Image (cartoon, rainbow, N blue to C red):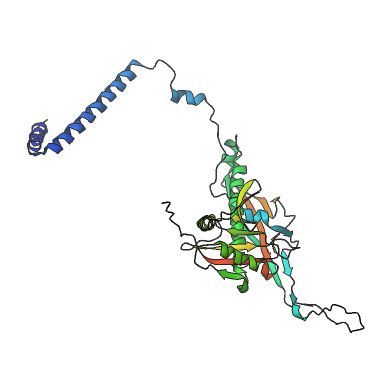
Amino acid sequence: MRGFPLRHHLLGVWWNSASIHDRRYARTLLLQLSTLLLKLDTMSEQSKQGQTALGDVAARHLAIATRTAPQLESISPRWLVHLLEWIPVESGVFRLNKVVGEDSIEVDCSRRDESILPHTHVDYDENPREYNLSAVNTLVDVHTRVSDLYSKPYNQISEQLRLTIEKIKERQESELINNKDYGILSNVATKQIVKTRAGAPTPDDLDELLTKVWKQPGFFLLHPLAIAAFGRECTRRGVPPPTVSLFGSQFLTWRGVPLIPSDKVPIVKGKTKVILIRTGESRQGIVGLFQPNLPGELTRGLSVKFTGINDKAIATYLISLYCSLVILVDDAVAVLENVDITNYHEYNYK
């Protein structure tokens, strides 16, 4: 208690020297503190009197909460995987045979005479490229105690496998675009690469891409931010792109070709790329490859295998997905580079 007189003395010294503003601020704080203390006293008095009905906290122990399955934000529609034609590869190897010396193939439009017809033949590439299926793998560990005791209403093993498979499929789409061996961006012919005129993706730039893949173009593939950047350029020019409904979703189009979003198209320092694709083997486009009839096959090219339980009672499951991608001819794909997604416009309506 010896400190109280000293504290009161120091408080008096401060009060005498304080400005009018500081004194008003101090009165406000004291008033707020008094109100808080009054509320605490009231709550304490009510607790002493006892509750008159069942409280929420206790009641919740008898209630059943509606639960959701675990949500994974990184799951995307993976439109590229859906839009590709997939070819089964029985032996895990796909050989792409190409014709060489196409200009040497001679034909003749016959005249009404006895002119000699040309002799010709079609030569094949003697060293065709072979594509090996690539694997995306992981091991999922689940403690048997967890799966035994906590699998209602959601099976723990099923949920662990489901979420991991989603991540594997997301990685698959990323590899189809970016893989250094077979990815689209790594295998575009130099003649099929164009650059933007002014940085931002304009209707003129996409028209230029269409000249590169003019034989039955399928779709543009680009990052959602690139779609937004293209939309801004269209708005600025007064030519809003029409939309089309595919798979129950709305897509912007340009010249009737849909703009398909994928967050796997890379963005580096505000720059990205726009890809124009023709798909299908009969169209000499881009095709996906997968291994059929896998042991433990769950979906196309994906299998799940139980590998055993270790001495710590942990069960392990091997998830494997085998795939690759082939550009059958050079003009099946074209890429617009140096696409600036940071350009915005100001509109003055005066």
Residue 13 shown left or right of residue 128 in the figure: left
Residue at horizontal 73 percent and vertical 69 percent from the top: 95
Q: Position of residue 200 (x, y in %)?
A: 50, 63
| In the foreground, 44 or 228 | 228
Q: Position of residue 195 (x, y in %)?
A: 54, 69
Q: Residue furthest right?
A: 114
Residue 99 shown left or right of residue 11 in the figure: right
Disc tally is 0
Residue 40 shown left or right of residue 174 in the figure: left
Classify residue 84 by image quadrant.
bottom right
Is residue 242 something that shows in the picture?
yes
Q: Position of residue 123 (x, y in %)?
A: 78, 78
Which part of the image, by quadrant, shows the N terminus? top left
Residue 61 shown left or right of residue 246 in the figure: left
Q: Position of residue 310 (x, y in %)?
A: 59, 49
Residue at horizontal 60 percent and vertical 68 percent from the top: 186
Q: Is residue 190 above or below residue 141?
A: below
| In the foreground, 237 or 19 | 237
Q: Is residue 156 above or below residue 221?
A: above
| In the foreground, 68 or 110 | 110
Classify residue 329 by image quadrant.
bottom right
